[in-house]
Image (cartoon, rainbow, N blue to C red):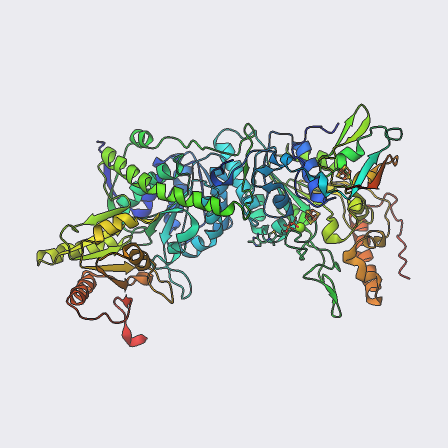
Amino acid sequence: MKLNVGAVCGPGGSKKNKTGHWRSFRPKVDPEACNGCGICFMYCPDASIKIVDKICIIDYEYCKGCGICAHECPRDAITMEEERK
Amino acid sequence: MTMGTKRVMEGSMAIAEAIKAARVQVISAYPITPQTHVAEFLAEMVANGELEAEYLKVDAEFSAASVVFGSAATGARSYTASSSQGLLLMTEVLYNMAGMRIPVVITGMNRSVSTPVSIQPDHQDTITFRDTGMIQLYVEDSQDAYNTHIQAFKIGEDRDILLPVLVAADGWTISHTFEPVETFPQEEIDAFLPPYNPLYKLDPKEPVTFGAIAMAHNLMEFRYLHHQVMHHAKKKVEEVAREFKERFGQDYGGLIQEYRTDDAEVILVAMGSLVGTLKDAVDEMRETGTRVGVLKIRCYRPFPDEEIRRVLSRARTVCVLDRSISQGYGGPLTIDVKAALHNQRGPQVLSFMAGLGGKDVTIESVKGIVEKAQKVADGIPVDEEPEFVNMNWNIV
Amino acid sequence: MIPEQELFAPGHNACAGCGPAAIARLILKATGDNIIVVSPTGCLETFSSLYDLSSWEVPWMHPLFENGASVASGVEAALRILGKADIPVIVIGGDGGTYDIGMGALSGMFERGHRITYICYDNEAYMNTGVQRSSATPYAAATTTTPFGRRSIGEDRPKKNLAAIAIAHDVPYVATASLAYPRDLMNKVKKSLTVDGPRFILVHSPCPVGWGFDSALTVEVSRLAVQTGLMPVYEAENGEITKVFKIIPRPVEDFLKVQRRFKHLFTSEEGREQIELIQAAANENITKMGLAKEPGRKVKVDAS
Ligand SMILES: Cc1ncc(C[n+]2csc(CCOP(=O)(O)OP(=O)(O)O)c2C)c(N)n1
Ligand code: SF4
Ligand code: SF4
Ligand SMILES: [Mg+2]
């Protein structure tokens, strides 16, 4: 790709940068415990959580494994497990 | 060709008239002598409803430059002006907008810089912009200032260029001096200068990111592209000056302007209002048969090296008059002219420091410079370089 | 409902658990896509704008460190003259770019009355350059330029009260907010956009790296700052404080002890005294601003 004038670039190109490999801990959702309240979705700094059909779905392509979602979940539905590399 | 209206006006008014004629949409400025009159005249025009523009009176020159940077990035034709310390304060923003390729026009109303404190003209302020990546045009008088400001928008906003343009005009000599200036009807200016139509702008309909980060793998490539565009801008500066001449009958040169250089043995090189004095001196000296001419550098960046070579290689001696100093080496313009001529079996280049801090450069001083050039041509060795013209040696 | 649309795209290079990243995302959820954003230099700018890997799905510009407010002023002026004044403009800048180097520009933006929402994400130091102090660094915090040492207890000056400075400019809408209360933050951002004139929102934005806590605790730490009274959350309209977020005050130690930057306070006698001073400052916030849910309730400080 040729460089653009003045380093102006298009929107949202960061999606090409899959940050999931940064992770050393992996959030794991217990679908029984999760009621889809969306608190985790609200806090995730990496926009890596979606609530689909009242269940929290984690996007491991980008999730950096910070653990905020697990810490904030009022129902302890998310646990952080060591990432198998 | 369009006929204009000739009126006697202050140089600052000629610039304000040009800004009005260019239908500038956002203005921001902070007062500093000798730029103040431009800032005031424009405020008056906006207050009277003569000029439909947003005029932001800001907290500092850093903000003035930043405001017009933001407004131009949003798609409005934008303008600021300053002098001396104020220009220096803008510096970081100017690099930033040139790299981002945001066209803005900036008047540098030339004044020396502190310390010592001086409100008198020289080029010490704008010469520091050399490597900002802006196009830099130096004007000779009020008419040139009027013409060049209008041309500057057309050059900078061209889709193939997209660069800020500095128009440097000597403080006092231009800013505060009354001269006849021909201005042109608005329709004719509109026909010459269409509205600004940016390639990219801040717009939710087409979101873009301005000001991204480069890394070692692409920074140099971005610099290369910018450098290429500066080269390309040489053609644009010439082209726009030519079109202006065809439409309005005004000719102050493009990249350079030659004055009686055809058979000249000695050629004087300078920028800005000094050129007027040089032309007068040349006329006088020509009457007594001295073969002398003037080469005006109108465009300092991009530097017209080829054009300079073409003109100067015909001379025996070249005298460069610098109005700023790179302490510890010499005159910045001399350095560039010498570099342009290197490897040429060409003329000898002599360097003169002239008119720093408003020091007089008279026709007599110019004659002295030419006499020295003739002696050097006759084999008398050059003493200390550069020569400081009209020095009071009693106080140093 | 919090919109699903992600206008601050993933794939940015913020550290795991970054408060400012979470906040930027929430701000854009509040504004929607009809917005122009200016960000001065700082972590947010750096981690979101590698060439061709921008996280911004909205028009965004990074000029320099010190001119976010002035550039935004130019953007707003241009929109006015171009007949597009319906497009709102916001700035999202760090504490360094706001409290310190951008202060003159910010004051000018306030004074000229631009219709701009200036949001400062306050992570209380220059994080992007490696955690040096700013005038937003709280008293006694250790940073790389205010280290704890034989002759230093960390930062030796109290945090500058920037929201009060904004109020003193007659800014019609001033609010403080915290990552811990995202709906409140988003409501404030939304509300600000309807105000005629300049607006200022200060958002407390914990940084796990610079403050020294586990990345899972980012929200927890911001909550503790609010609940101890160290970070009052309020709204001021036309110079009057109109809304205060009520708390049941907790001792400041709860906030301090989870962070490496205050660790030295717990290992020395002197530190204990500093904690008391910090508690006194929190108490003053609590009384002055009426933060406590049960007025009159004293906070017991256990300095033993
Ligand atoms: C004029 C200038 N001085 C210094 C810097 C170096 N610098 C870059 S970011 C930064 C600190 C930013 O601090 P803050 O605004 O608090 O944002 P943070 O990184 O903490 O998010 C500094 C000092 C710069 N870029 N420009
Ligand atoms: S661990 Fe962090 S990054 Fe991953 S989904 Fe949870 S909050 Fe998001
Ligand atoms: S240093 Fe702090 S503010 Fe900066 S990216 Fe990392 S977590 Fe975020
Ligand atoms: Mg900071």
The residue lying at 69 percent from left, 43 percent from top is C20
Q: Quadrant of residue C86?
A: top right
Rendered location of residue B140, percent (x, y): 27, 49
Compared to residue B363, the image places residue C206 above or below, namely above
Which residue in the rendered view is the most extreme toward the top?
A53
Residue B76 is at least partly visible in this image:
yes
The residue lying at 60 percent from left, 29 percent from top is C34
For the N terminus of chain C, the image quarter is top right
The residue lying at 46 percent from left, 32 percent from top is B199
Rendered location of residue C204, percent (x, y): 72, 46
Rendered location of residue C119, percent (x, y): 65, 42
Q: Quadrant of residue C184?
A: top right
Which residue in the rendered view is the most extreme toward the front?
A85
- Relative to C195, is B140 on the left or the right? left
Nearer the observer, B170 or C4? C4
Q: Quadrant of residue C181?
A: top right
Residue C290 is at least partly visible in this image:
no
Compared to residue B124, the image places residue A70 above or below, namely above
The residue lying at 24 percent from left, 41 percent from top is B7
For the C terminus of chain C, the image quarter is bottom right
- Relative to B67, is A29 on the left or the right? right
Nearer the observer, B350 or C284? B350
